[in-house]
Image (spheres, rainbow, N blue to C red):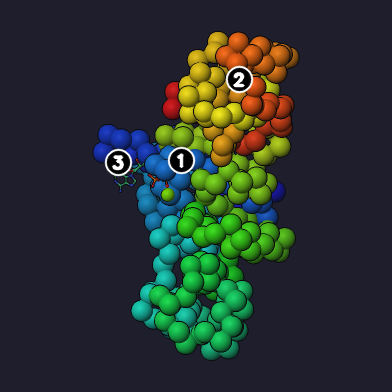
């Protein structure tokens, strides 16, 4: 089956700066494909090229069978795009916003009113349809922005950090919507910098400094990690973090809330060796246990390997 989205050596330069550096990937129908990376990694630039908003400076690609270099207008009518800065008009009411976006997509009459009702339902607007958008809570605004991006019922959705700035409960609710779309056969391309969100994707590409440094299912990315991971908690956390990092048998470290993740070669007796060092330092109040790798561990490892 042809991929819904596919790119080859996709590149975007701004002057002499390469924001997206020769990336390759494809996304199949119904898949939830995540783009995970820190600020400035090139996520939005990639999405804009796929949505026909920004012209690539190198490489090629297609979305829904349309060429991203020459058929941008066709692409725009067959996708839903939720930009990082939501496109809603703050001073218009919910209904006015939806009517406006509906008309952009060429909807009218009963079709338009049905789709508006659907979007309002999905966004859980209740009886606030005549309120101006700026008075709505952030979570509802986000759902409404999604609703307005899918008024024309597109088969592919591009969501650029749709959940940044909302609380974890609203984020969960938002993901329920994403799952529903995927089950209905829609393809989802979503960017995030939340590791726990990336876990929900069918596959993820890790992107750093414009390059895809790993691409696979969350389970395989974690399974392929070359290290064992331990969680270490101790008082004097900051001081200990520097100390742990300096140990030659420690391959990587990452901070997780108030715990330190310590990565070491497979089979290394970390518990015993670190225990002996703690004893020498007269530290008894600590806890160390082996844990399953998290995506953050994978990310840190890959990032370090690429000199970030
Ligand atoms: N229009 C532009 N002109 C110059 N540099 C840009 C432009 N848009 C993005 N960049 C740069 O490209 C890099 C990637 O940006 P972006 O794709 O927005 O990253 P992300 O979405 O992953 O945070 C950043 O260094 C950013 O400053
Ligand atoms: Mg961005």
* Nearer the observer, 269 or 143: 269
Where residue 119 sits: x, y (%)? 57, 76
**Residue 299 at x, y percent in the picture:** 56, 33
Task: Give the secondary structure at mark 2.
Answer: loop
Query: Mark 3: is the Cβ under 8 angstroms from ligand 1?
Result: yes
| Rendering quarter of residue 151 | bottom right
Let me know if residue 56 appears in the view: yes
Marks 3 and 2 in Cβ contact (< 8 Å): no
At 50% from the left edge and 15% from the top edge, which residue is drawn? 246
Q: How would you rate the neighbour count of disc 1 (Cα within 10 Å): few for under 14, some for 14-19, many for 20 or more? A: some
- Location of ligand 1 given as a quarter of the image: top left
Q: How many marks?
A: 3
Is 117 above or below relative to 240? below
Which SS class for mark 1? loop
Instruction: Judge whether 273 appears above or below 28 on screen.
Output: above
For label 3, the crowd category at 10 Å Cα-Cα, with few meaning under 14, some 14 to 19 and many 20 or more, is few
Disc 1 residue: CB within 8 Å of ligand 1:
yes
How far is disc 3 from disc 2 in space, using C-alphas? 52 Å
Number of the front mark, 3 or 1: 1
Mark 3 or mark 1, which has the lower sequence index?
3
Q: In the orientation shown, which residue stands out farthest toward the left?
A: 15
Distance, label 1 to label 2, CA atoms, is: 35 Å
Q: Which mark is residue 69?
A: none
Residue at which label 3 appears = 14
Name the residue rendered at 61%, 61% in the picture. Answer: 169
What residue did someone put label 1 on? 38
For disc 2, the marked residue is 283
Q: Residue at x 68, y 26 (%)?
A: 288
Q: Earlier in the sequence, mark 3 or mark 2?
A: 3
Of residues 267 and 302, which is closer to you in this image? 267
């Amino acid at each position: 089956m042809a991929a819904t989205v596919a790119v080859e050596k996709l590149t975007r330069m701004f002057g002499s700066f390469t924001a997206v550096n020769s990336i390759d990937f494809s996304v199949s129908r119904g898949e939830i494909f995540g783009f995970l990376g820190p600020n400035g990694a090139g996520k939005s630039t990639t999405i804009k090229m796929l949505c026909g908003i920004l012209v690539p400076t190198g490489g090629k690609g297609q979305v829904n069978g349309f060429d991203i270099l020459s058929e941008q207008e066709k692409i725009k009518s067959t996708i839903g795009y939720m930009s990082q800065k939501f496109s809603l008009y703050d001073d218009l009411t919910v209904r006015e916003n939806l009517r406006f976006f509906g008309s952009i997509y060429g909807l009218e009459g009963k079709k338009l009113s049905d789709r508006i009702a659907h979007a309002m339902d999905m966004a859980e607007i209740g009886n606030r349809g005549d309120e101006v958008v700026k008075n709505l809570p952030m979570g509802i605004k986000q759902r409404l922005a999604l609703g307005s991006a899918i008024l024309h019922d597109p088969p592919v959705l591009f969501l650029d950090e749709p959940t940044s700035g909302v609380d974890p409960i609203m984020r969960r609710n938002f993901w329920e919507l994403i799952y529903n779309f995927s089950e209905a056969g829609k393809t989802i391309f979503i960017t995030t910098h939340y590791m726990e969100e990336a876990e929900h994707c069918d596959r993820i590409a890790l992107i750093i400094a414009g390059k895809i440094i790993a691409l696979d299912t969350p389970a395989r990315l974690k399974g392929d990690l070359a290290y064992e991971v331990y969680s270490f908690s101790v008082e004097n956390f900051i001081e200990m973090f520097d100390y742990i990092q300096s140990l030659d048998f420690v391959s990587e470290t990452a901070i997780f809330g108030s715990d330190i993740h310590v990565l070491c070669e497979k089979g290394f007796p970390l518990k015993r060796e670190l225990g002996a060092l703690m004893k020498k330092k007269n530290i008894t109040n600590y806890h160390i246990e082996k844990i399953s790798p998290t995506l953050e561990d994978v990310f840190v490892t890959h990032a370090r390997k690429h000199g970030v």
